Structure formats: C-alpha cells, structure tokens
Image: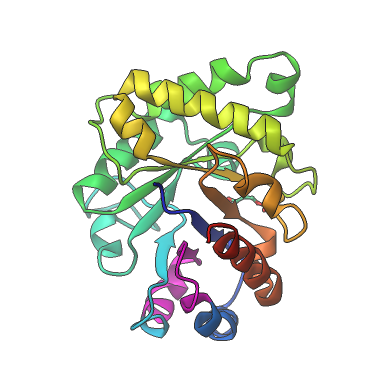
C-alpha cells in the first residue's frame, strides 16, 4: 500500500505574511486528514515561518529547489545543509527550472545525490513538451530524464516522482486520467528496470498539471497514480482543502 501524497508547489508566489495566512487558514483541517501525506512547498524565505506554524501537525514542508553544493561562494544559492530541519522534501528538476534556468538532467542528478546525502527526500519532476507528445516521444523523453536524472543513484523508496507534462502545467488543460495512468505505469515499469520491482512498487508517482477540485478524482482513482503535485490551485485555501479532502475520503 502506497500512502497518497498531495504536494503544494506555490512557485514564486506569496510574501511571508501571505504564506503565513494561507497556511493558517488550512492547517487545522489538513491536519485532520489521516489517509494522505501533505507537503507544502512555499518559497525559501517562508520555509522557516511555515515550519514553525506547522509544529505539532503531521503536515510536512518541501523546498522548490536547491543547489548541489554544501556551502561556499555561490551567490544567491541555497544548500541542502541550509534546508536540513526546515523541510523534509525538495522539488528537483521542475520543468520551469529546466526551461527558465537551463537546468539539465546532469544538474538535476547532482542535486538529487546531494539532497539524499543530507536526508532530504527529492520530488523529481519529469515530463514531455507538447511537441514531444505529438511526435510520440513521451516515453523516450521520460526514459532519458530518469536514466540521466537518477544516474548512479541507488534504490531509494523515499524518492517521489512527479509526472508533469509541460503542456498541462498552468494551462487549464489537464491530462486525461486514463492517459496519465498509462504514462505513470510506464514510469513505474521503467523504475523496475532501473532499480527493481520491489522498490518501484513502493515508489509514489504523482501527476501534476492543472489539477483542480473538479478533476482530482479522475487522477487519484487510477491504480498507478499515487497523488498530485498542485500548482495554481494550491494557492487558494478553499480549493486546496477541497482537493485534499477528496483524496483523503477516496482512500477510505
Ligand atoms: P498547475 O497546477 O498550476 O498547472 O502547476 C502544476 C505544477 O507545475 C506543479 O509543480
């Protein structure tokens, strides 16, 4: 049995007071949900405030990125050592980092290795573009992202993989649940080859891209989809609670 995950990726949104306010509106209700693992990923500057706010709850936190080095002359970067204690998870390889900040699979690979060394659990994002999808390259692209991103990384059940097709992110054009399940099954089979079947059966693989309260069941009702990574809809307390609640109830 894999515990379903709902992760909120706030991206570059919320000031510290806004972050505080958003979590305050949701935390009591989220904490009552016993069948799901909840991860909030605010901007770096709000991590410590939110960690404090969530003390005594089962809600976890995640960073949205990090640098692979432990410390040093890397102006503007945040290291895994700095994140330790502030969050359990770290999102790595998000398509927006790959696109706007030229992160490639080798960089992502270094970051994953480094995160694991500091006991941070990576949420590895992979996904194909619309052009790649339309030219039937989805499986090839995902395979390559997994091969390179996880190069020389040993079996680890703490890894979460998020399948986020680029064409579904922030577009309101979510993937079809059936299709997403087929792709996520492909990812799971690929992980069985890369690592082994026992680990791949235990890995949580999420869907992300225009998830909302009106389509969540389409995803979490599928056997290979173990939860969701939510962007835009995670910035509205009522909407995020609604999504989380539906997943929590679905499992019972
Ligand atoms: P949206 O839910 O806004 O489409 O974003 C998805 C995403 O990128 C989560 O990481």
Q: Is residue 101 above or below residue 26?
A: above
Q: Is residue 31 magenta?
A: yes
Q: Position of residue 246 (x, y in %)?
A: 64, 63
Model colouring = rainbow
Q: Nearer the viewer, residue 65 or 38?
A: 38
> In percent of the image, x 55 and y 32: which residue is there?
184
Q: Position of residue 154 (x, y in %)?
A: 22, 31
Q: Nearer the viewer, residue 99 or 130?
A: 130
- Identify the image quadrant of residue 176: top right
- Identify the image quadrant of residue 129: top right
20 sits left or right of 75 in the view: right
- Count of marks placed on residues: 0
164 sits left or right of 215 in the view: left
Q: Position of residue 58 (x, y in %)?
A: 38, 73
> In percent of the image, x 76 and y 19: which residue is there?
134
Q: Is residue 151 magenta?
A: no
- Magenta range: 30-51
138 sits left or right of 90 in the view: right
Q: Nearer the viewer, residue 226 or 223?
A: 223
Q: Is residue 177 above or below residue 211?
A: above
> In percent of the image, x 41 and y 47: which residue is there?
2
Q: Position of residue 234 (x, y in %)?
A: 63, 65
> In percent of the image, x 48 and y 20: which residue is there?
143
């Amino acid at each position: 049995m894999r515990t379903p995950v709902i992760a909120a990726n706030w991206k570059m949104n919320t000031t510290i007071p806004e972050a505080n306010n958003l979590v305050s509106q949701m935390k009591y209700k989220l904490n009552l949900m016993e069948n799901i693992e909840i991860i909030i990923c605010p901007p770096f500057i709000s991590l410590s405030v939110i960690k404090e706010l969530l003390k005594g709850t089962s809600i976890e936190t995640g960073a949205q990125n990090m640098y692979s080095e432990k410390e040093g002359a890397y102006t503007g970067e945040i290291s895994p050592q700095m994140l330790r204690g502030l969050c359990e998870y770290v999102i790595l390889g998000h398509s927006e980092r790959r696109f706007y900040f030229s992160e490639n699979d080798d960089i992502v690979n270094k970051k994953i290795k480094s995160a694991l060394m500091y006991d941070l659990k990576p949420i590895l994002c992979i996904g194909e573009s619309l052009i790649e999808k339309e030219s039937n390259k989805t499986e090839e692209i995902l395979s390559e992202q997994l091969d390179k991103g996880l190069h020389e990384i040993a079996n680890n059940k703490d890894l979460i993989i998020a399948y986020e097709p680029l064409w579904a992110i922030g577009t309101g054009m979510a993937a079809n649940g059936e299709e997403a399940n087929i792709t996520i099954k492909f990812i799971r089979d690929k992980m069985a080859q890369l690592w082994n079947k026992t680990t791949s059966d235990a890995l949580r693989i999420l869907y992300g891209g225009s998830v909302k309260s009106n389509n969540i069941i389409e995803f979490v009702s599928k056997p290979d989809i173990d939860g969701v990574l939510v962007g835009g809809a995670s910035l509205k307390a009522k909407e995020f609670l609604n999504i989380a609640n539906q997943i929590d109830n679905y499992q019972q």
